[in-house]
Structure formats: C-alpha cells, structure tokens
Image: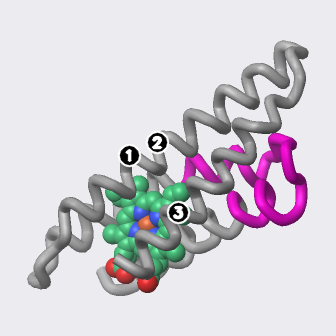
Amino acid sequence: MDLVHDLLVLLHILGMAAIVGSAVFVARGRVTPALLWGARAQVVTGILLAGLVSAGDDPVDTTKLGVKLVVAVAVTACVEIANGGRRRGKGERARLVTAAGVLAVLNTAVAVLW
Ligand code: HEM
C-alpha cells in the first residue's frame, strides 16, 4: 500500500507540474494537452490519495481536503471550458487558462502551507 501511495503522490506532483508549467510558465493563455490532462489527473489522484490517507491511522484535515477539492474542480472547469471554446473555434479564452494556473498555484500553497 505504501508503494501505491508513493506512486500516487508522484503522479499528483507531476500533475501539478503539468498545470503550473503549462499555464504559468510555458504556454501562457493557451490550452495544451499537458494542462488538460494535468487538471484531470489532479482530481483523480487527489481523491484516491484522500481515500488512502483517510484509511490510515493518522488524523486527516477534512477541511483542507475539501478546500483542495473545490479549487481543483474550479481548475478543471476553467480548463475544460477553455478547451471547449478552442475546439469550437471561439478562440483561446486566455483568461480562463490563466485562472486555472493561478488556482493550481493556490492549491499547491494550500497543500504545502496549510
Ligand atoms: C490543482 C489541484 C491540486 C494541486 C496543485 C495539488 C498539489 C499537491 C501537492 C504539491 C502535494 C504535495 C504536498 C506535500 O507532500 O507536502 C499534494 C498532496 C496531497 N493532495 Fe493535492 N493537489 C491538488 C488537488 C488535490 C485534490 C482534489 C485532493 C483531494 C481532495 C488532494 C489531496 C491531496 C492529499 C491527500 C495529499 C497528501 C499526500 C500525502 O502526502 O500523503 N489534492 N497536493
């Protein structure tokens, strides 16, 4: 179970890197596959990690996890709406991509500083 947990944490951190790297540092304002799949991966790996951590003996901060879930869903919504607009030829919706990057940085701060 430790290996599963550690692999999930690895995927979770790579997902964060994909979102922040793409939206904040590399492809500002543009939807990329890294951004799209990173956002989806964060919700999935985050929920799996929350389940694993809750099944352990240590106390879990459910408020923190709830905040992270809400922020992660907002990140995914921004990216999916921006991607939908791009596919229908309605432009890049750069502000939504920027919002997704900023929210992912916020969730990283929540993960590390809370
Ligand atoms: C954009 C979305 C997210 C980002 C950027 C993000 C970022 C991070 C980072 C950087 C860590 C490592 C922190 C550390 O080890 O000190 C972490 C850990 C964690 N995250 Fe997330 N996260 C996101 C979404 C979520 C969601 C939706 C959940 C579940 C509700 C979640 C649950 C967790 C848990 C349980 C850990 C601790 C893993 C452990 O050390 O056992 N995360 N997150």
> CB under 8 Å between callouts 1 and 2?
yes
Mark 3 CB near ligand 1 (8 Å cut)? no
Q: Tell me which secondary structure the magenta stretch mostly adopts.
A: helix
Give the CA distance from mark 1 to mark 2: 5 Å
Q: Name the residue beneath numbered marker 2.
A: 73
Vertical side of 83 occupied by 39: above or below: below
Q: CA distance from mark 3 to mark 1?
A: 12 Å
Q: Mark 3 and 1 residues: CB-CB less than 8 Å, in contact?
A: no
Disc 1 crowd rating (10 Å Cα; few below 14, some 14-19, many 20+) is few
- In the image, the segment drawn in magenta is 19-41
Given the image, on which type of amino acid does mark 3 rest?
A: Leu
Vertical side of 28 occupied by 21: above or below = below
Residue 73 percent location from the top left of the image: 46, 42
Q: Quadrant of the N terminus?
A: bottom left
Q: Which residue is mark 1?
A: 70
The three-letter code of the residue at mark 2 reads Val
**Scheme of colours in the image:** one colour
Q: State whether residue 37 appears in this view.
A: yes
Q: Which residue is mark 3?
A: 106
Is 68 situated above or below 1? above
Left or right of residue 104, residue 47 in this image: left
Residue 83: mark in rendering: none
**In terms of secondary structure, where does tag 3 sit?**
helix
For label 2, the crowd category at 10 Å Cα-Cα, with few meaning under 14, some 14 to 19 and many 20 or more, is some
Q: Position of residue 33 (x, y in %)?
A: 79, 47
Q: Quadrant of residue 103?
A: bottom right
Image quarter for ligand 1: bottom left
Q: Is residue 31 magenta?
A: yes
